Image (cartoon, rainbow, N blue to C red):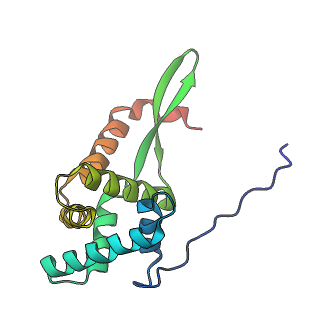
Amino acid sequence: MSRRNIAKKRYPKPDPNFKSSLVSLLNARILKNGKKQLATKIIIETFAIVEEKTKTPALEVFEKAIKNTTPLVEVKARRIGGSTYQVPLEVNRYRGTTLALRWLIKASVDRSGRTMSFKLANEIMDAANSIGNAVRKREETHRMAEANKAFAHFRY
């Protein structure tokens, strides 16, 4: 039996500008080389663009985008008897949110556009409307899990 302590889950403090812990998670994902001020500036500009274009509160649009990109199932490689199977597993809420944020940022980096805040704003608006690369990634993950449903009995 392991004698190691189980690490307690640490939840982020809400963002001071938007009073949302989801925004502080986004800030942490955008963060590069410890430049938190730059990441915060990108988020503020992004939300300003979203509000200007959609005429609705940016936080609502952002939360809807996260909801639309959060996966319910994912596949994990499991090695059994010399062969590797893609085993579908349910995703817990925290990991789902993390994946959604990661996919949103990756999709916005890959987009063409002027600035990061402009690209991120467009990706958030697309995700809120259930289109865009981040939502496509979620659907692709769900398809993979559906295709490998036969291996569901190999769960961890």
Q: Residue 94, position in %: x, y?
A: 50, 61
Residue at (39%, 84%) from the top-left corner?
18
Q: Is residue 78 left or right of residue 43?
A: right
- Across and down, in percent, residue 141 comes to 34, 43
Where, quadrant-wise, is the C terminus in this rendering? top right
Quick check: 28 above or below 4? below
Can residue 134 be seen at all in this image of the molecule? no
Residue pushed farthest top?
82
Q: If the image is split into quadrants, where does the N terminus sit?
A: top right
Residue in view at x 24 percent, y 80 percent: 48
Q: Is residue 12 above or below residue 34?
A: below
Residue 150's spot in the image, x, y percent? 41, 30
Q: Number of numbered discs present?
A: 0
Eyeballing the image, is 96 above or below 41? above
Q: Answer with left or right where residue 59 lies relative to residue 23.
A: left
Residue 124: percent from left, percent from top = 25, 65
Q: 25 or 5, which is in the foreground?
A: 25
Left or right of 105 on screen, residue 92: right
Please tell me in which quadrant of the rendered image residue 68 appears: bottom left
The residue depicted at 56 percent of the width and 24 percent of the height is 79
| Quarter where residue 51 is shown | bottom left
Q: Is residue 85 visible?
A: yes
